Image (cartoon, rainbow, N blue to C red):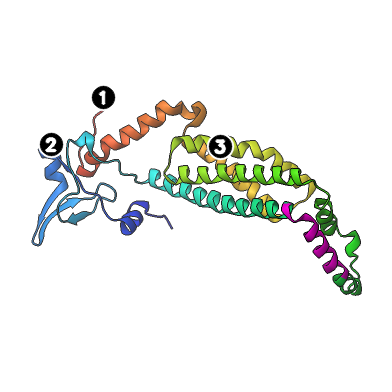
Amino acid sequence: MKIDWDRRHCARRGHVTYAPDDSRLRLRLHAQTAVGDAWRCLRCGDFVLGEPHGSGPAAEAPLVPRGKVLRDLFILRFLAIERAVRGVFIVLVAVAVWKFSNSQDAVRRLFNEYLDVLRPVFRHFHYDLDNSPVVGTIQKTFGYKHSTLVLVAALLLAYALIELVEAVGLWYAKRWAEYLTVVATAAFLPLEIYELTEHVSGLKIATLILNILAVLYIAIAKRLFGLRGGRKAFEEERRSASLLEVEESAGLEVTAG
C-alpha cells in the first residue's frame, strides 16, 4: 500500500495555505464556498476553509516539504531517533565505567563473593564459571588501571556527544549533520566489521547493515561529496521545487527558463 506522505503529514501537522500576488495564481488557489473562502494547501492540494497562512510573491511562497522530500525527512528523523537512543545508552555506559573506576576494589570483592555463591549452583548444571568467557572478561576489567578506565569513560562520552549532535542535526535536516553522520558512521564501520570477526550476534549484524544503508542513503539522496551533481544540483532541485509549488498547485503549465 502506497503511503500518501502529503496527506499523512497534513493530518498530523495541519495544512499550509498561501495567497500569491499574481492574480491568475490567486484565482486558481482560491475558491468561494457557501461557508466561506477556501485556499488550496501547498502540500496536499486540498482546499482548506479560512484565511491563508501567508501572502506575497509566488517565488516567496514557503518551502513546504512534500512527496519524496517529505519521505526523505521521515527517514532522516528515524535515523535521528536511532542516534539519540544510542547516544543516551552510551552516556549511561560511560557513567557506569566512571563509577566503576572509583570503586573498583569494592566491585571486585562483591563480584567474587557472588561468584563463590553461584559457583556450586552452576556446577550442578555442568557449567564451569571459572572458565566462562563472560566471567573472564569481567575479571580482566578489574586489572585495568584507574586512569585507563577514566580515559575509556571520556572517550565514550565524546562518542555519545557525536551521536547526540547527529541526532539533533538530522531531526532538523541540516546539511552539516548529514556530512557528519556519513563521515562518523563510515569511520566506525571497520571496527564494527572487526567485532563481527571476533563474535557474531544478531544485534551487531543489524547495526552494521543499518549503518551501511544510512551512509549510502544519505550520501546519494542528499548528493554529498559531489555525488549526483553535488551541492549545486541539490540546491537547484530544492529551489526548482519551491518555485513550482504554487504553480503546480494552481494547475498552470510550467515553462522552462
* Element under disc 2: loop
| Label 2 sits on residue | 22
User: Residue 4 appears at what percent x and percent y?
Assistant: 37, 54
User: Residue 169 appears at what percent x and percent y?
Assistant: 46, 42
Q: Nearer the viewer, mark 1 or mark 3?
A: 3
User: Residue 42 appears at what percent x and percent y?
Assistant: 25, 46
For badge 1, the amino acid type reads Gly
Above or below — where is 197 with respect to 110? Answer: above
Q: Residue at x 21, y 48 (%)?
A: 17
Q: Residue at x 39, y 43 (%)?
A: 69
- Is 147 placed left or right of 216 in the picture? right
Q: Nearer the viewer, mark 1 or mark 2?
A: 2
Which disc, if any, is residue 182? 3
Q: Is residue 103 magenta?
A: yes
Q: Is residue 44 magenta?
A: no
| Label 1 sits on residue | 257
Q: Earlier in the sequence, mark 2 or mark 3?
A: 2
* Element under disc 1: loop
- Magenta stretch bounds: 102-116
